[in-house]
Every structure is written in structure tokens, then in C-alpha cells.
Image (tube, coloured by chain):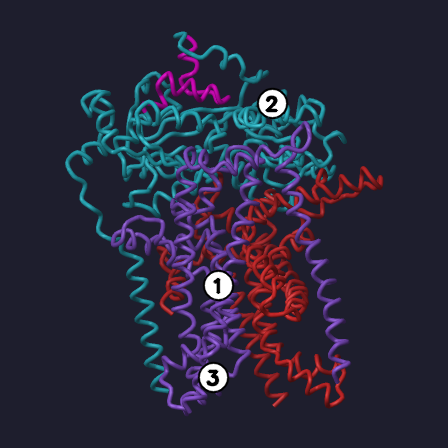
Amino acid sequence: MAGSGVRRERVQRRMRWAVLAVAALFFGGPLWAMVVFSTSSPTGVTGATWRQLLDVDALSRTYPSFVEGVRVSAALAVLTVVLMLVLLVPTMTWVRLRLPALRRPMEFLCLLPLIIPAIVLVVGLAPVYAWVTYFFGPSSVWLFFAYTVLVLPYAYRAIDAGLSAIDVRTLAEAARGLGASWPRIFWSVITPNIRTALMSASFLAVALVLGEYTIASLMSRNNLQVGIFQLSQRTPAMSVAVSLAALLLCFLLLVLLTLVGGRRQRRVSAYPVHVEETS
Amino acid sequence: MRTRSVRGATACAVALALVGLAACAPPAKEASGEAKKSSTATSAQAFGGMDALVAAAKKEGTLNVIALPPDWANYGEMISAFQTKYGIKVVSAQPDADSATEISTAKNLKGQGNAPDVFDLGQAVALANTDLYAPYKAQGFDAIPADLKDPDGKWVNDYGGYISIGFDAKKVPAPKSFADLLKPEYKGKVALNGNPTKAGAAFSGVVAAALGNGGSADDVAPGVDYFVKLKEAGNLVPVDPTPATIQSGQTAVVIDWDYNNAGQTKALAGKVNWKTVVPQGAVTGAYYVQAVNKDAPHPAAARLWEEFLYSDEGQNLWLKGGARPVRGEEMAKAGTIDKAAYSALPAVSGTPVFITEEQRAKITDYLNQNWQKEMG
Amino acid sequence: MPTGVVVVQAFLSDAGLPTLDNLRALGGGDILRALLNSVVLSAVTALLGAVFGAVVAYAVSTASPDGALRRVVSAACGVLAQFGGVMLAFAWIATLGLSGLVPTFLRDHLGADVDTSWLYGLRGFVLVYLYFQIPLMVIVFLPSIDGLRPQWREAAESLGGSTWQYWRHVAGPVLAPAFASSALLLFANALSAYATAAALNAQSTFILPLQIGNAIGSEVVLGRQNVAKALALEMVVLVAVIMTAYAWLQRRAERWLG
């Protein structure tokens, strides 16, 4: 038995690297073309554009709205993730436990924001935002309502995958039998078990918020991408460099997020053991 | 069964409530005395002279403009000149938007502080939405020819240009006419700025191509045929040209307004030797339209912006960007025009054709029926 | 799900006076062709994206769950899944366009003259769309693959099952529903992608989102805003039909298996 396990591991490792190498080639190619473009000049390779971009002081003086956009987007990312999780996780768990007939309609409902193109969606959002502006003011931060809607399709899929992978009903019933309350089941049993799924959903939410341009722009709000667009009007090389930098920034942020999430998981995983002990 | 119908009823009630919410707008904030006066003023005199207008605009402190790309007709410099002169902050939203989006944004954001104050529109969209504008007559209004303005000042033409061929002189030989672009030297290099059923520049581009190929503004079929030939020869690249595609050589030839191509020359100086030529025997022109949003959140600043645009300074700034300002001829006679910029405009041979509204309707119909079919 | 309902009213509220003209416009030859192209494009990219994405997700899942590889790949996928629009189009044009990196390289070093005008047609769109479809699949499918217990595989092996049998009879059926739902998500994702398509081919409206863009933001042809909404409605109905069919198939499958 051990022999086959070791062999499988070797095969898997080889396959892993082969697959990832092909993927890296496919995904790296266009990115490489962007790097080449942003560093090319009639006289050869130049780092001028990137130096301009790294000069944060000068940048924030000439483009105050860019810096503000970064701040707004950071706030939007956090708010969207929180609202998305608060809305989806309990609802989806509940639907799975108690109202399985509603699963399909709910999935469809969550897909809707994806099917309707953003340019049409704005028309529907406009009257809602007329009220939002009336009550809360015109700050761009309120976009997180709209973004939560946009994230729904992706987040739903990721969380649903996580919930399908564990047997929610059995887990819940077992915990119930042990005398746990619903909030406690939810918090100590379900949530730790769908960690990968929650991470995936949050990833997509963060990436979407940091990458969203159409809605913010059509509603004349400011965010990271709107700021980037203004910056990119300077020179073509700058526009490409700036979008590459934004991709990189977003990537690093997500890696950071996995580190934070990873640490929390180890702390939380003590809970199920704890439940067993109290029994 | 019962729970289901109850659930259904609840869903209906929620949906109805939401539809209701969407249908009625929140109460508008009542305009105070001064703002109300500003938003009904039809000239600087109504404020009590230019100084009073400047004071009222400064008090508002901000101006929202929309769909003004900095490399389009020199708007980048126009905005910064206005900011330094009056100390009013200009917020430039959606610099890449089209005219229809300007109007829909104004409708969507009505009553909100970030709604656009002023519009810069294509002729067709401008004429279709006149009920959204506040009439205002800036200085020099009377001298503008009658067919380039609304008699009440609801809209006024601001600047115009001709369809031109921009090209990278290092990569391709200089074309003189549309026919030249069919040659194999231009394989995979020619782009049209936008889709003629959507963008004004591309629309006029097709009309110009028709003129250059034996057609007229009443018969654009030769123009469509020309682009089909261009496509079949493999010369037409269907991408939307941007400065990035130009610099990387993917669109070494771009058919666009002459002031846009002039803007590229400036933006790409030192990287690409971008030249502009107005094709022989195919001179098609069009004006853009200036209007004030009647629900402008900054009514005085909006009016001051108009005064600035139609001042000699503003007109010369447009000219510097390669656009032909509406007061150009009058200023040339008066000697107030920027002569260097005026003589740097690309040479035009032949009588320019301006499309009338009836012609526009006919061309639109023809393009709607044929462009998609032919271009696939 | 109050937020979901907001979306439903998005296109109910703006209809103004009810009319059938908008819906009648949907019957036009152009639009039907665009619909067909859209379905083909979305289905092909959803299928290819789902298959390749699942393979990558599986490859990643065999690595240690807390390892650096996994962190890097999932973060990269999160970013790339939302990468689109003008920049994505430009990246591909700069790679494969006639004066892009690859054709230039081939011309200069191998003397081969390649025609890459297919990049702006349906085939090119498939390639470009896969650039965001595959990462999206990886990230939504990873949780499902993580749900596969190693014990199942060990159990299969101790009963003498081959790798193929394990996938065919154990992992496959377990993953199938999630795979299909993810493919559906990818389908919808491709169906509505607009900015990338518009930047890649401005001259053609051969897919639905481009038709919508033209109807809603034209400087030339006016008064077609509501046709855009009818088109959006058509897309919603399309997905609804596919979902219903899928639910029906799944029920049938359950009955057969049961």
C-alpha cells in the first residue's frame, strides 16, 4: 500500500508541474507582452514609465483622485466581503438545511447580476442610488451595495461548492444532538469546515471590487480603476504599466489574505475537538 | 400548499414595493434663492455682469464635466487653464464616454451633486434631447452663424473638424486618398475609430469614404463597399484604436477626426511620428455641440465654463488641439486668432460636406441594414 | 435575498410604457445570428474553461493545502478571473496581433508569415475569454475538489480499484453536480462579457453584448435604449431555460442512479 502511495505522489507531483507550466505559459504570454510594451521605446528598453509610477509623492500631488480611489477601493473591498458573507453564508446554510426546494431559484437569482451586462444594470441601480444619495450622501463608499450584488454569482458558486463538499445536514444534526444552539452550530461547526470556500468567495469579491470600472464610472463615482483610467490617459506606456501594477498589487493583497486566513484556521480548528470534549 | 401561496404573496409584495421605490424619485432639495437665480440665468448680464458670474461660480467651487478625454480637442489643457484662471475645481467624469452616455448619466444622477453640469455632444444626440438643456447665450453668441446654434441658446456648436487619415510615417508610406489604403503596404494596419452605427467619427468616416469612391452624402453605399474591400484585402483591423494600439504599431493607420489625430501626434511625440492628412476629394466635416444641463448641480460654474469656452482664449485652446472653433473665421478676420495654430491645421482641398439631418436619417437606415451584414 | 430582487426590478422599472416593439426587434436576422454566436461562444468557452480549469484545480489540490504554491495559484486566479476589458484585449493584440510579439518572433527568427486575423473573430474570442474563464473555474471548483476525501481513494484502492475506476465511479459522480454548476457560471460569465469584446472588435456586433452596447450607447442611431433592455431580458431567459433543462436532467439522472 505504502509503495503505491509514494508512486502516486510522484506521478501527481510530475503532473502538477506539467499542468502548471502549460498554464503559466498561456497566462504569462499576454502579461509578458504588456511588460515588453511598457518598457519599450524607440531607443531600446527603458524603465522610465515604471520609475514615474513608483514616484508615489509626485503621483499623489498630480493625481489626488488616484490616491483617493485607492482608499475608496480598499474600504469597498472590506465592506463588500463582509456584507457578502453576512448575506450569503447564513442564508445558503439555511436553505440547504431547511428549504432545499429553493436552491435552484436562489442559484438563478444569484446568477442574474452576471447575466445582465453592467451597462444595463446601471439603469436599474440609478433609482436605488438616488435614494442612497438622499439618505447617506454621494460618497463612493456606498457603491458596496452594488458590488455585493455583482459578487453574488461568483460567491454563491464558491460557497455552494464548499457546502456540497461537507454533509451540512449530518453535521448540524449531530451538533444539535449534542445540545448546540443554531448560532453556535453555524459559527463553530459549519464555518470552519467551509474555510476554502469562504476564502475563494472573498478572493473573488476582493478581486472584483479592485477591478471594477464600468459601474463606478457610469455613476460618476471614484475608485481604484477610475483613478487608474485617469492616470493612464497620460501615455499609452503608462496605461499598460498601471494596469500591470494594479494586477500585481491585487495579487499580493490576495496572497496576504491567504496568510491571514491560514493562521485563523489553525486557531478555529480547535473548536470541533472542544465540542467532543464537552459531550 | 398554504405556505407556498403565502410565500408567493410575500414575494409579490416585495417585488411591488421595490418597483414602487424605483419609480418614485426622492424629493429634490429645494434650490435656495441664489442657486435658483443661477440656474435660470440666460446670459452673464442676468448675474449682473461677468464679475458677478465669476463670484457666483467661485462660491460653488466645483464644475462637473463629462466625456472630455484630455487628448480630445485639447480638453486636457482647456480644463487646467480654467482651473488656474478661476480657482474652480473641475471634476472630469468618464472621459471615455459617448454622447448617449452623457445624457443617460445626467438622467441617472439627476438631483445628485456629481451629475454633469455641461455637455459636449454629437449633433444627433444633442438635437434629440433639447428638453434637458438650460438656454444660455455666452459672449459672441450673436456672431455665430444661425445654422450653427439654437436661436434661444439651448445649444450652440462649439468646434468641428474633418475626417482624416492618421498614419505612422515610420511604418507606412503617406496615403493621399482612401484608395491608397487598399494597397498591400497597409495590410493589417488600418483601423476605423469605432463602429459607424455607434460612434460619430466612424459614421462620418464611412460618409467620407463614400465621397472618395464616387458616392455622396445621399448615397453612402460606395463607402460601405469600400470598407468591405478593405476588409477582404486584409487591410482593415477591427480593433478599437487606442494610443496603446497606435504606439505598438497594431493600428498604424487610423481614420478619425483631424483633431483627434492631431492629439495623437502630440501625445505620442518622441515615440511615433504620427502624421495627419485629409483625404483628397472626401472632405466630410461635423461640429460638436455645447449645452448646459438644466439640472446642473453647479449652475453658475456651468455658465462660467461656457463663457470661457467661447472666449478668444478658449477658442484658441481648441484650435491648438487641432479642432476648428466655431468663432474661428470671425476671429481670423478680427486678428485675435492664434495664427501659428491656425496655419498648422491639415490642408483641405475641395468643398467640405456637412451632413444634414435628413441625410443623417437616411444614412443611419442604410448603415443599420448593411454594415453588420457586410462586416459580419 | 433582498439584493437579488433589486436586480429583478432593474429591467422592470425602466420599461416605461409597455410595448411589444422591443421584443419584436429580437426577431431580426442580425439579432438571431448574434444570439446563436453568443450561445456558441459561451458554451465553448464554458466547456473548455471548465475542463482546463478543473485540471489545474486538481493539480493544485494535490499540493499541500497550506503551501506556497497553492497560495500563489489561488491568488493569481482570483486576480486573473476579474481581468478583462480594454487591457486584456490589448494584451492579446500585443501578443498575437499582426505586429505582436509572437508573429514578429516567427517572422524574424523562423521566416514564417502567419495570419492572425482570426484573433478578431469567434475563434480569437474563445482564446481571449479562456484567459478569464479558466482562473474563474479554478477558484470556484477548488472547494469541491477539496471535498474529496483521501480515504475514499484509499478505500477504492484497497478494494483493488484502478485510478480510472476511482475517477469513473467515485470522484466523478461526486464532483459532477459542482462541475456542471460551475460550467453554468462560466457560461453566464462569457455571455455578458462586453468590454473585452468591444475593444477586440469594434466593427462587428456578432455577439449579443455588442448588440446591447450599440443599442444603448449610440451617437448615431437613437431611441433604441429599450431594445437594449429587451436584449438583456433575452439573455436572462436564455440562462433560465438552460438552468431549467439542467435541473430536469439532474433529476432524471438521480432517478436513474437511484
Q: Please give left or right for residue A74 compared with residue B192 in the image.
A: left
Residue placed under numbered mark 2 in the picture = B276
- Residue sitting at x 34%, y 16%: B143
Callout 2–callout 3 Cβ contact below 8 Å? no
Q: Amino acid at mark 3?
A: Val
Q: Amino acid at mark 1?
A: Val
Q: Nearer the viewer, residue C175 or B349?
A: C175
- Confirm whether the magenta stretch covers residue B173: no
Q: Nearer the viewer, residue B297 or A81?
A: A81
Q: Which mark is residue C20?
A: none
Q: Give the answer, above or below, for where B220 lies relative to C121.
A: above
Q: Quadrant of residue A191?
A: bottom left
Residue placed under numbered mark 3 in the picture = A273
Q: Chain of mark 3?
A: A
Q: Does the image show residue B226?
A: no
- Residue sitting at x 46%, y 67%: A110
Q: Which residues are magenta?
A: B307-333
Q: Chain of mark 1?
A: A
State the image coordinates of residue B237 (x, y, percent, origin top left).
Answer: 66, 39
Q: Nearer the viewer, residue A250 or B312?
A: A250
- Residue sitting at x 42%, y 52%: A74
